[in-house]
Image (cartoon, rainbow, N blue to C red):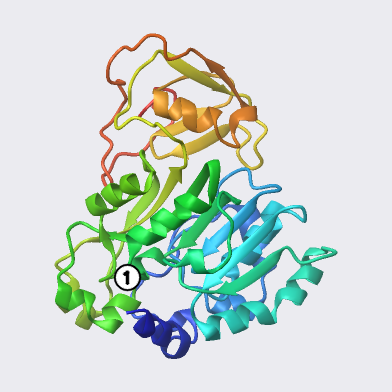
Amino acid sequence: MNEAVQEYYGKVLQHSDDLQTDACCTDTAIPSYLKKAMAAVHDEVSARYYGCGLVMPQQLQGMRILDLGSGSGRDCYVLAQLVGEQGSVVGVDMTDEQLAVANRHIEWHREQFGYAKSNVEFRKGYIEKLDELGLENESFDIIVSNCVINLSPDKAAVLREAYRLLKPGGELYFSDVYADRRVEKELVDDPVLYGECLSGALYWNDFHNLAKQAGFLDPRLVEDRPLGIDNEEIALRIGHINFFSATYRLFKLDGLESHCEDYGQAAVYKGGIAHSEQKFLLDKHHLIQKGKMFPVCGNTYRMLKESRFADYFDFYGSTDTHYGIFSGCGTLIPFGSYAVSDEEEDCGCC
């Protein structure tokens, strides 16, 4: 299947307009600071972008980031601006044509960003075989991926390798396509449906199980949206399955619990995170307002306290007393209608 994907993204697709569906397209509101960063990316790089979401989490200054399936390098060059000259970005891709575009503009972007030395590099390889690329264990603060893991024939290996390469407290923050059921094998074997990021999509519950088996014990859904299939021929073949674009964040934290447990803990956001001064979005059920006590479960407490976000919060409580299951607001379902509203943002949802 890797050969078919290389053919599709290296030779069949020459521009984002060549896609036959909107699965590999980003359709979400883009903050102004990201629009500015995207505008600083070379036109040829942007023209061969096939992502389905935004993989730029908060607080990136000085971070070391790995991009799985970096393609022409669009996200890498955006992230290179957000991590700053002291940070670094490594992109991994298997397609020669995409890597050629990415590498062709390294120096152009260095000059565009005003850096003395480029903070971006690209390596050829398979995202399920990162152990072949000489990357050191626990050497990255953040790993991102944009609509690529669905294309891998061994998604469990991708998640295991990501866990190995992340520092403790680091996170895998990625957007991808998911299905509401398991996709039939004859559809998975179709190179067009696979290349369009549809038939390789994981059933969401299988994804949760694979993530937990890899060590990411509490996957957090950040945002999601349903995908339409405007191509009538493709819709006739695979339209009986509902597909979604979703962004998850998976923290590398040993000993997270399988459920949201209540220990009477809370956190207060002090502000200070760029572009999130008044409100901090951890995930779809945790929009934390600055200066206000926010009750959290034990897992959320640790995600904030044992990650790069720790300095921006005050923490209250311990695990000395257990009060049972955390009583959150709303039901945590992968692709439901529930979203945090302004009225609900302070309830402490888990």
Badge 1: residue crowd in 10 Å (few <14, some 14–19, many ≥20):
some
Describe residue 51's horizontal placement relative to residue 82 as left or right: left
Q: Is residue 235 visible?
A: no
| Image position, residue 41 (x, y; %) | 67, 70
Image quadrant of residue 239?
Answer: bottom left
Give the position of the C terminus as an image quadrant: top left
Q: Which residue is located at x 49 percent, y 87 percent? A: 14
Q: Is residue 318 placed above or below 217 in the rendered structure? A: above
Q: Is residue 316 placed above or below 287 in the rendered structure? A: above
Count every numbered label the image shows and give the total.
1
Q: Is residue 52 visible?
A: yes
Give the position of the N terminus as an image quadrant: bottom left
Describe residue 287's horizontal placement relative to residue 268 as left or right: left
Image quadrant of residue 186?
Answer: bottom left
| Image position, residue 134 (x, y; %) | 58, 65
Reading the image, the residue beneath label 1 is: 153
Considering depth in this image, is 14 or 215 the residue closer to the camera?
A: 215
Q: Which residue is located at x 44 percent, y 23 percent? A: 346
Considering depth in this image, is 289 or 111 the residue closer to the camera?
A: 111
Considering depth in this image, is 22 or 297 the residue closer to the camera?
A: 297
Describe residue 116's horizontal placement relative to residue 344 as left or right: right
| Image position, residue 256 (x, y; %) | 39, 32
| Image position, residue 161 (x, y; %) | 45, 57
Q: Which residue is located at x 23 percent, y 50 percent? A: 205
Type of amino acid at the residue the image marks with label 1:
Pro
Mark 1 lies on a secondary structure that is loop
